[in-house]
Image (tube, grey):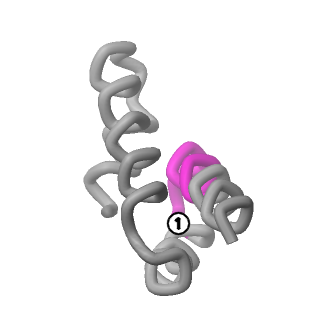
């Protein structure tokens, strides 16, 4: 999960888009509560972009509930 968040926050457009698609697929296919528990650890990450991607994924999980 951390690697996906790091790749989604890169400047390389193709890598970023593919990682975001993988994150969205993970949000759609996995149970929301366990994924929320894992994502909440990355909200306090030192990298601001990782925090942003984690927040977007959390928002998508909550919308799924």
Mark 1 nearby-residue class (10 Å; few <14, some 14–19, many ≥20): some
Residue at the limit of the structure toward the top, as seen here: 13
- Residue 53 in the magenta stretch? The answer is yes
Seen at 39% across and 24% down, the residue is: 17
- Overall secondary structure of the magenta section: helix
Q: How far from the left and from the top, in percent, is residue 8?
A: 40, 37
Q: How far from the left and from the top, in percent, is residue 40?
A: 57, 78
Q: How far from the left and from the top, in percent, is residue 16?
A: 38, 27
Left or right of 39 on screen, residue 2: left
Quarter of the picture holding the N terminus: bottom left
Seen at 34% across and 17% down, the residue is: 12
Magenta range is: 45-54
Position of 42 relative to 8 (above/below): below
Q: Secondary structure at mark 1?
A: loop
Seen at 69% across and 72% down, the residue is: 65
Q: Which residue is mark 1?
A: 45
Position of 29 relative to 16 (above/below): below
**Which image quarter: residue 19?**
top left
Q: Nearer the viewer, residue 60 or 19?
A: 60
Left or right of 7 on screen, residue 8: right
Position of 7 relative to 50 (above/below): above
């Amino acid at each position: 999960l951390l690697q996906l968040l790091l790749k989604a926050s890169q400047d390389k457009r193709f890598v970023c888009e593919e990682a975001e698609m993988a994150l969205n697929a993970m949000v759609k296919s996995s149970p929301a509560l366990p994924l929320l528990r894992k994502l909440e650890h990355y909200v306090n990450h030192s990298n601001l972009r990782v925090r942003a991607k984690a927040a977007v994924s959390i928002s998508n999980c909550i919308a799924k509930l």
